[in-house]
Image (spheres, rainbow, N blue to C red):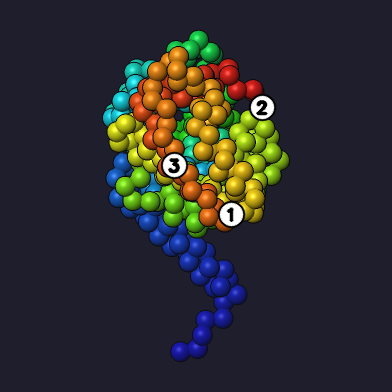
Amino acid sequence: MQPHTDASAPHAAASDAGRRRVLVLAAASTLLWACSGNGEAVLVDGEKVAPEVIDKDPLALLPSGAIMVSRLDAQAMFRSGFGADAARLIANLIPLGPESGFVASRDLTTLHGGLYAMQGADFCMVAQGNFDRDAIQRAADARAVTVAGMPLVKSHYAGFDLYTAGNVGFVVLTSRTALSGNETGMRRALDRLRFSKLERSQPEWAIKLLETQNASVAVAGDLTTQPGAAAVAASSLPFVAGLHYLRVIGNFQPPGVNFAGALTYGDAQQAAAGAAALANVRSFAAMMSLVTVLFGGSIPNMQVAQSGSDVAFTLPLDDRLMRLLLGRVIDATRPGALPAR
């Protein structure tokens, strides 16, 4: 049989093939949403993104260029002696009442965070747990002001609704994942989702530290990315002078929380100065604005050891001291405390 020579045949064949591809893609998409567990289709600038893609790797949502990244086992924190104070902190970051169906001590499981110097001191956190998206949206839309008395402002960015109170707010991505932070930090995280850049931007050593087994909290810092910010911090925290890298892990065991960490400086001389600053426990307490003699709590028994440009330390903090420290963080993150940008 001779081949068909009708000039319209290639176009007809291409059209049929295109229709078949559309039907196959539609069927595949339907199957994907049906098998996704919760059936929710996440729209990002008009494009559907499977919720499990967003849920599977919270670190991929964090913007690049972080000065510090962290992971927190929220449930372990809530079970500690300062769990009630921790819940107050979460209320600042996710300003929702019980009408939203969200109770932090019950529904929040983990927090991954990043600290930045994009337009000042910016931060973004990826909260994972259980979020009733419809109930939260209804509650947020109906609430004119937060519990703290600040107006709750709704805006739209990259296909999502953002709710902010005094430049600190949240956006629910899926029934398992939400963002919190200041507006700059959250927008940069949404940009990663919008431009399909869902891949980890943190160095491998930092990722390994955050994934440390049996650690309820882990913090990895690279101050070489923002030397200007490090210099500013050193004015009030002397041990930061000359600091390049920070690695800290901890757990919520008696007497409250126990930290173990390592600091890497530019050279041995800077490390010696950093070790001396850390070893001065009373000065360290003063830097945290904690007057232990007046407010109670045991003075931390910090152990410090220097080896070349590295300084290792351990630091236990009892529940009362942690409540005082959390009080400072709560004040700093209260709606209206951060400058609007």
- Residue in the picture at 29% in, 45% down: 37
Instruction: Let me know if residue 111 appears in the view.
Output: no
Identify the image quadrant of residue 115: top right
- In the image, residue 279 sits, relative to residue 211, either above or below, namely above
Mark 2 or mark 3: which is in front? 3
Three-letter code, disc 3: Gln
- Categorize mark 2 by other alpha carbons within 10 Å: few (<14), some (14-19), many (20+): few
Residues under labels 2 and 3: Cα distance?
40 Å
Relative to 104, 148 lies left or right: right
The residue that mark 3 highlights is: 303
Nearest the eye: 311 or 122: 311
Residue positioned 69% across, 44% down in the render: 227
Circle 3 residues within 10 Å: few <14, some 14–19, many ≥20 = some
As drawn, the label of residue 309 is 1
Badge 3 or badge 1: first in the primary sequence: 3
Disc 2 vs disc 1: which is toward the camera? 1
**As drawn, is 257 to the left or to the right of 238?**
left
Q: Nearer the viewer, residue 215 or 276?
A: 276
Is residue 2 shown above or below 214?
Answer: below
Residue where numbered disc 2 is placed: 341
Which element carries disc 2, helix, strand or loop? loop
Report how far apart the C-alphas of labels 3 and 1 lie in the structure: 17 Å
